[in-house]
Image (cartoon, rainbow, N blue to C red):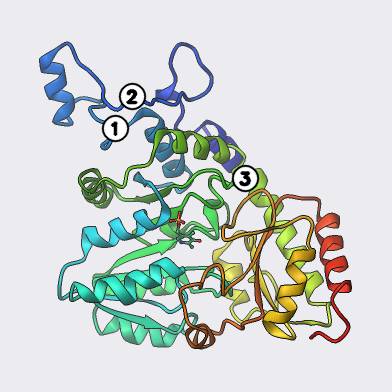
Amino acid sequence: MKEPGFSTRSLWAGEKDALAFGATQVPVVHSVSFGYDDMDEWFEVARGKKVGHIYGRNTNPTVQAFEEKIRILENAEASTSFSTGMAAISNTLATFLRPGDRVVSIKDTYGGTNKIFTEFLPKQQIDVTLCETGNHEDMETEIAKGCNVLYLETPTNPTVKITDIERMAKAGKEVGALVIIDNTFATPINQRPLALGADLVIHSATKFLGGHADALGGAVCGPEDLVEEIYHYREINGATLDPMAAYLLLRGMKTLKLRVDKQNENALAVAKYLQTVPIVDDVFYPGLETHPNHHIAKNQMKNYGGMLSFSVKGGIETVRHLLPKLTYANRAANLGAVETVVGPSRTTSHVESTPEERAALGIPEGLVRYSAGIEDIEDLIHDLEQAFQSLPQNIG
Ligand SMILES: *Cc1c(COP(=O)(O)O)cnc(C)c1O
C-alpha cells in the first residue's frame, strides 16, 4: 500500500495497540502498575521478552501511543518520550556525554539548552564550543577539531536563523559525532532531520505537536540502539511523560498537519505585512527572500513554520505600548499554540540572558517574537494594523 500522507498518519498512527473495549479513542491509563497472575508471564514481560507493561515510570499504553505517533511522523526506527522538552534534551545529552567529551553547538539554541551548555556541562568537565549560528565555515572548523556531539536547532529562537542540516551532519559524521537536532520549530510537517543525516531528532511536544498549550512533553526519535540507551537513562532517572499529558498531546497531534499548514500561511502573510510597516526595523522569517539563509531553508524545509520575529524602532518602549493593544494574541512565554502568542525576547526565550548577552546574540531589545496561530489571517493583520496605529505619536 502507498505510504500514507501526513494528515492520515497524524490521525491514525500509533493508536491501534492502545485501544480497548471497541473504543475508537486511546484511553488515558492512569494505573501506575500492571499486574500478572502468571508469574512466568510477569518475568517474561519484566525481562522484555514479551510485550507488556510493568510500571508507569518505564512504560504506559497511553504514553506508548504518543511515542508511536511521533515516531511514525518523523519516520524513525524508534522513539521515547519525556515529561518536558528540556527533559528530552538533558536526558539525551546525559546518556551519551562523559567527562572529557566535547560538544559543538550554536549560540542561538533555546534558552534552557544554552544554560545546559554554559552552566551544567562545564561542571562535568565536558567542553562546549558554541559557534556563530549560520556561520557554516566556522562550524565546520570547530567540528573538524573533533567532537562527540554536534547539537543543532534550526530554525532558532527567536531570530529564526537557519543552519544547513545536511552539510553539518556530514561534517559531524566525518569525526564520528552524534548529530542531534531540535526540530521543535519546524515540526515533521516542515522538516525531516533524520532524512538529512541527523542521528537523533528532539521535540518539545509542548509547542506545535500538542498545539493547544495545555500539556508539557518531549520526545526523541532515532535508531533503535540509540533510543534504547536514552530510554534506559530516562526510565531510571524518572523524567516520565504523564499519561494525561500524553493523551492531550495525542489529541493535539491529530490536527498537526491542518494547524501547521495554516500557521505556515499566516506567519508568511504576517511577515510580509510587517515589512510594510514604517516603525518596524527588521522582520525575521526564513520564508522571506530577505532572510540571509532563505535558500538553505528553501532546500531543507517543506514550508517555513509558524514562528517569526520583528524589531521595532524605539526598542522596548514601543514594545511596551504595542503588545497590550493586540486583541488576538496571548502575551505569554509559550509558542506553537492554535492561538497567536507574542512576547518580547527579553521576557520569553532569553529571559535568563543579560542585555549584553542578548546584544551579542543579535537580539535587539525591541524584538518581538510572534507565534502565528490559526486565526483568520485578515483578523491577525487588522489586529496588528490597529495596534501600530494606536502607538503614541512621539514613539519610535
Ligand atoms: C520550548 C522549547 C524547548 C523546551 O521545551 P519544554 O517543553 O518547555 O521543556 C526546547 N527547544 C525549543 C526549540 C523550544 O521552543
- Residue designated by label 3: 257
- Sequence-wise, the earlier of marks 1 and 3 is 1
- Asked whether mark 3 lies closer than 8 Å to ligand 1, one says no
Name the front one of labels 2 and 3.
2
Q: Residues at badges 2 and 1 in contact (C-beta under 8 Å)?
A: yes
Q: Is residue 396 left or right of residue 237?
A: right
Identify the residue at image location x=33%, y=66%.
179
- Sequence-wise, the earlier of marks 2 and 3 is 2
- Residue designated by label 2: 31
Identify the residue at image location x=40%, y=74%.
168
State whether residue 219 is above or below residue 281.
Answer: above
Q: Is residue 262 left or right of residue 126?
A: right
User: Residue type at mark 3?
Assistant: Lys
State whether residue 125 is above or below residue 336.
Answer: below
User: Residue type at mark 2?
Assistant: Ser
Secondary structure category for the residue under label 2: loop
- Residue designated by label 1: 56
- Asked whether mark 2 lies closer than 8 Å to ligand 1, one says no
User: Residue type at mark 1?
Assistant: Gly
Crowding at dot 1, Cα within 10 Å, few <14 / some 14-19 / many 20+, comes out as many
Name the front one of labels 1 and 3.
1
Secondary structure category for the residue under label 3: helix
- Sequence-wise, the earlier of marks 2 and 1 is 2
Nearest to the observer: residue 105 or residue 343? 343
The quadrant of the picture occupied by the C terminus is bottom right
Crowding at dot 2, Cα within 10 Å, few <14 / some 14-19 / many 20+, comes out as few
